[in-house]
Amino acid sequence: MVAPRATQPSFLARLVLASLLLLASAASTPAQGTVMVTWEIPTEPAVLVGGPVFLDAKIQNNSSDTVRVNMGHHGKWNYEFTLVNPDGTTTPIPAYRQFGPGPKGTVSVEPHQTRTRRLVFNEWYTFVRPGDYTLKVQLTVLLSSSANVSWQKEFFEDLAVKVAPRDAEKLREICAKLAETAVSVNSPEAAADASLALSYVVDPVAVPFLAKVLKEGEAAAQVNAVRGLTRIGSQEALAALKSNLATAGPDLKAKIESALSQFRPGT
């Protein structure tokens, strides 16, 4: 007796089966890559009472697509910080809410590339006491990418921050490097960033370096120098501001005059 011959599936049935297998394979295929956002506080320059504190955000795109990470207006609005003090108490840090023109908040990262965005943490908080702190960083981001990239809505990290006591000589070295960069004409962006960091050195040693930037820097750096001298608020800072009134252009002169009005009588 001859066994019945197996019925071969029709062409249409084979096509449907192939389509189902393809869809199942696509559904089970993992994302082609991931995006990671991490932070670190560089140890150079040293973190000192009265000095600038830098925070580096590193965006690592391990996917095959270009991604865009939104850090908010000025590249700072989407940050949330909480500081754990040496005694274990916590200090909530107000959000950055400066308006007006500023750096672009969206960072584009090409496939398999890493970009770093440096912030000056003093724009949020200034350390006034030495000690071992923990900085809790959180960034709520929106990623614009294809479905091939896996990502999470919130990135967060706890960073150890060791703040050393004030050291006038180290502060002077830091100020000298920042001032040199701030008066450079080769990179206006780097000059503006350096002058911003220098403006947060709220210490008498910074006055001559801020005065140099006010005299020799470009417009953006000069504005930061005015703000830095105003924060220090000493007689030397007052003299540095007054000495530039005669040669300042209309815009800078208006900013210097506004700064002078903030000095207390008898400063």
Image (cartoon, helix red, strand yellow):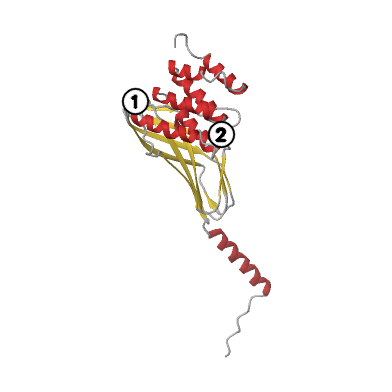
Q: Which x, y percent locates residue 125?
A: 44, 27
- Above or below, 188 relative to 229: below
Q: Quadrant of the N terminus?
A: bottom right
Q: Which x, y percent locates residue 138?
A: 46, 37
> 197 and 139: which one is in front?
197
Which element is circle 1 on? loop
- Residue 74: which disc? 2
Whether the residues at callouts 2 and 1 have beta carbons within 8 Å, the answer is no
Q: Label 2 vs label 1: CA separation?
A: 29 Å
Which element is circle 2 on? helix
Q: Type of residue at label 1? A: Arg
Q: Earlier in the sequence, mark 2 or mark 1?
A: 2
Q: Which x, y percent locates residue 35?
A: 50, 49
Which of the 4 image quarters holds residue 170? top left
Q: Type of residue at label 2? A: His
Q: Is residue 126 left or right of residue 166?
A: right
> 215 and 198: which one is in front?
215
Q: Quadrant of the C terminus?
A: top left
Which of the 4 image quarters holds residue 41? top left
